[in-house]
Image (cartoon, rainbow, N blue to C red):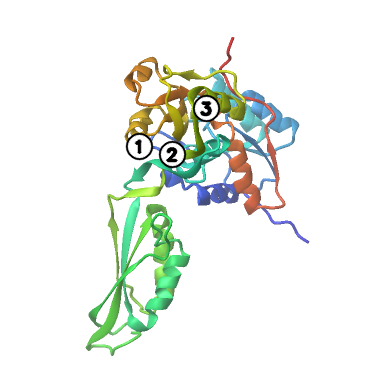
Amino acid sequence: MKMQKITLRMVLDAIEEKAPVNLQESYDNSGIQFGDPEKEVTKGLLCLDVTESIIDEAIEKECDFIISHHPLLFGGIKSLSGKNYIERTLIKAIKADIAILSAHTNLDSVLAGVNARLASKIGLTNLSILAPKEGVLKKMVVFCPLSHAKILRKAIFDAGAGKIGNYDCCSYNIKGKGTFRAGDNTNPFVGAKGSIHEEEEVRIETILPEWLVGKLVKTVIAAHPYEEVAYDIYSLDNEYTSAGMGMIGELVEPGDEIDFLTMIKKNLGIDCIRHNPLSGRKIQKVAVCGGSGSFLRHNAIAAKVDAFITADIKYHDFFDVEERLLLADVGHYESEQFTKEILYEIVTEKFTNFALLISNQSTNPVRYF
């Protein structure tokens, strides 16, 4: 049996199907860092950071591409002379023809992403987004004859629209009367050329994230019986509760602070946690954010959590939370170390016969003495 040809673009599409690039933060640079999107790839290496030693590992293991969590390139490059580790790493990748792609804050933002994995590692259940995304929701309104409303609604839902929280197939439908007059160069589904026609129609309203707009428009046009489809798309200010930064969950049983911190160290395999003074509170409701999440501390306080686990907390941030919660810094690399597992699962689920390796080295640049 002939093996399926897999390109770099196909791998990226598989990742972005689960973690749409529209969800990345404005400063981010997820996607292909280096490489031809149409390049055929056969073996990949997964890592958190792309470094010179990661390129060496990829060469040694005969990998032709790398998937990282942190992008190698955040800003523009005006020259490529090897003056820093980014340029040296990129030069080495170019010489070895090893493509690089990354999934960063888009993977942080999804329900089944970095924060959900961190939450599961420390035993949290009943997960929800701590700071839901805003400005990514759209509403589509389409007008359809009564005879095809059911068919069109099914096509809309199958395309991924109509999801609100844990509900799907959500729409609002209003019956009314549409009018139109077909011109000479038309082939109308109902009515006659040159005559004003009235048709009993349904106004179907549904909600969708912005990255599905193109797909949904094509779906609606393909499923609609009219030659010219009337539809509207509106931007919404509603929060998108299915994506955003950080995550909230609960421990099965409350416990004291020392036991909680001890469990965190064991489950994450770490030796050190920075935290604010203990206050004797019981810990059950917990917020997490992999990576630099201190900016969410006030969201965590507003959510009335008992503890907030993240990384890169500044000195004065520990003062800022006072005794309103236990604020714990477990380390940037340590809080995102399981991202490689997520990427492995996404890609191997899509391409079952694909060679994918998880890097055996830690790229953590921080050491503890």
* 90 in relation to 130, above or below: above
Q: Give the quadrant of residue 150.
A: bottom left
Which amino acid type corresponds to the residue marked 2 in the rendered image?
Ile
Q: Mark 1 and mark 3: span between their CA atoms?
A: 19 Å
Give coordinates of residue 36: x percent, y percent.
Answer: 58, 43
**Which residue corresponds to the image point at 28% horizontal and 54% vertical from the top-left?**
235
Which amino acid type corresponds to the residue marked 1 in the rendered image?
Ala
Asked whether the beta carbons under mark 1 and mark 3 sit within 8 Å of each other, the answer is no
Asked whether the beta carbons under mark 1 and mark 2 sit within 8 Å of each other, the answer is yes
* 253 in relation to 144, above or below: above
The residue singled out by tag 3 in the image is: 260
The reply, left or right, for residue 53 in relation to residue 166 is right
* 68 in relation to 84, above or below: below
Local crowd at mark 1 within 10 Å, few (<14), some, or many (≥20)? Answer: some
Say which label, 1 or 2, has the lower sequence index.
2
Which amino acid type corresponds to the residue marked 3 in the rendered image?
Phe
The residue singled out by tag 1 in the image is: 303
Look at the numbered disc 3 and give the secondary structure of its residue: helix
Q: Nearer the viewer, residue 53 or 359?
A: 359
Q: Mark 1 and mark 2: span between their CA atoms?
A: 8 Å
